[in-house]
Amino acid sequence: MSATPSTTNVIVNHSDGIPSADTVVPNGKVAVPQVDAYPHSFYSQFLSTQSKARLPSPIRGLMPLELVPGIISLLAGKPNPSLFPITSMSITVRSPHATEGTPSEKVITMDGEKLTEALQYGPTAGLPDSVRWFAGLQEVAHKRPQGTDWALSIGSGSQDLIYKAFLAILNPGESVLVEAPVYGGVVPLLKAQSADCTEIDTDEYGVSTESMREILANWPAGKPKPKAFYTVPYGCNPSGVTTNLKRKEEVLALAHEHNFIIMEDDPYYYLYFGSSPRPPSYWELEGRGGYTRGRVLRFDSFSKILSSGLRLGLVTGPKPLVDAINLHTSTANLQVSSTTQAIAHAFLSEWGYDTFFEHTRLVSEFYRKKRDAFAKAMEKHLTGLAEWTIPEAGMFFWMKLRLPPTAAAPEGDSEELIRRKAFDAGVLALPGQSFFVLGRATPYVRASFSLLDEADVDEALRRLAGVVKSVQMPNA
Ligand SMILES: Cc1ncc(COP(=O)(O)O)c(C=O)c1O
């Protein structure tokens, strides 16, 4: 992986000179043009009515003009920074390269103009230095040169951006494909939007493209096709599954055939510890050529690799979709905390991309060891009581408990067992039901292995095993 981005120009301006693509042809499919990247007009069909109606903030819309040389700005009601009580900020940062004889910590101080910028209102999409650094990261990590056909914006964690993206794309009642099980954090928002969700099952290789193909091939005539497919491709929360290259290629092909956007929610991308080479992201894959670029809206999170309290996430993808999210931010939050962005930028720019990748390698190695310890304890306590696949990324085991069948649940239901019996026995986990957007009885349970030490894992799984045994053999 070359750690040098080709350019620092992230502002992407798109020519709209290519004919609109949203032409319905007689077989009901949407004709998509074979061009390198879609024109801006192509995305109109994907934007919700609410999103199209959003107006730019009259002040924020003009803020970029403050940067024009020679301009004296009377525009924004920015507070006078000479009155800010913070006069300097210092952070102490651990180096991933620390070895014997090398200092392992460095103090970075922010003052002067950089401090003012950190404490002041700033651009909606992010502070220019931060946007540049993250754009360089996306270029290096996913091999998509800047200045071509994508834009990037910083959010208050990826959740903020995912929420806004769903609102930007879906009108109430419109169709969306979601993997099953799905990240529980999107379930309430999809329900609140009355989204018409179609679940696509997953197996150990990722989302089932066979099932997706069949569902789309048999889509009811006259019903508009799904606008998007939402997926967590690395170490999925909750299933732990990493979608392989073949499946990703097939999903991409289906997205083109059936005209939908892939919402790639990838907070565990850097927590890959599998033994085979990592599959490319959807966003990288579509940039490799062979398809018109612009079907993938990618979400990154720095919660799992830098800090979840900093609340930093990215959305990267077609400019019209990123712009729609920015318009939402400009009215809902004005901007992500610039202080947070400045803190992250202070040490990330000090590190550079190579050190960032070294840090993420160490993070994933840490979780690989946690995964191994958890797998050992699963083997010890749950053999014969549950089934599971060993995850190659992320923080979760998704286990199928062997539970007695009920009339409503032929494979049993973990809901009551986990919420009440397991809790009473002193172990807290998440019953699988929380991860199905359409709701279903399921014997699955999600267990997180990120925090506990080996002794606590052993004890937690011993308790869980006891609870499963108690319902398998109630009279034992
Ligand atoms: C799949 C998935 N998406 C999004 C998020 C939200 O992450 P962030 O902290 O960046 O908002 C999480 C957090 O656990 C997650 O698991």
Image: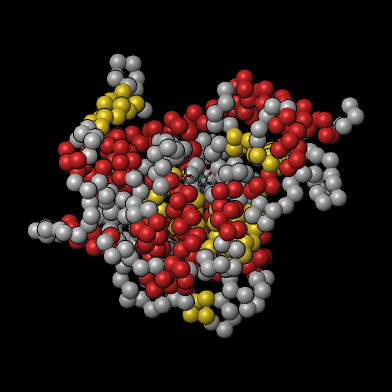
Q: Position of residue 196 (x, y in %)?
A: 62, 65
Considering every residue shown, the one lying at the far right of the view is 475
> Which quadrant of the figure contains the N terminus?
top left
- Residue found 57% across the figure and 26% down from its top: 452
- Residue found 26% across the figure and 26% down from its top: 107
Considering every residue shown, the one lying at the far left of the view is 70
Number of numbered discs overlaid on the protein picture: 0
- Comparing 291 with 27, the one in front is 27
Q: Does the rendering let one see residue 6? A: no
- Which of the 4 quarters of the picture holds residue 14? bottom left
Q: Position of residue 82 (x, y in %)?
A: 17, 41
- Residue found 48% across the figure and 54% down from its top: 162
- Comparing 212 with 326, the one in front is 326
- Which of the 4 quarters of the picture holds residue 178? bottom right
- Comparing 254 with 400, the one in front is 400
- Residue found 32% across the figure and 28% down from its top: 93
- Which of the 4 quarters of the picture holds residue 9? bottom left
> Which quadrant of the figure contains the C terminus?
top right
From the viewer's perspective, tell me whether residue 48 is left or right of residue 243. left
Give the colouring mode of the picture. Answer: secondary structure
- Comparing 337 with 400, the one in front is 337
Considering every residue shown, the one lying at the far front of the view is 83
Considering every residue shown, the one lying at the far bottom of the view is 26
Q: Position of residue 159 (x, y in %)?
A: 48, 49
Compared to residue 232, the image places residue 105 above or below, namely: above
Compared to residue 368, the image places residue 50 above or below, namely: below
Q: Does the rendering let one see residue 388? A: yes
Q: Position of residue 389 (x, y in %)?
A: 66, 39
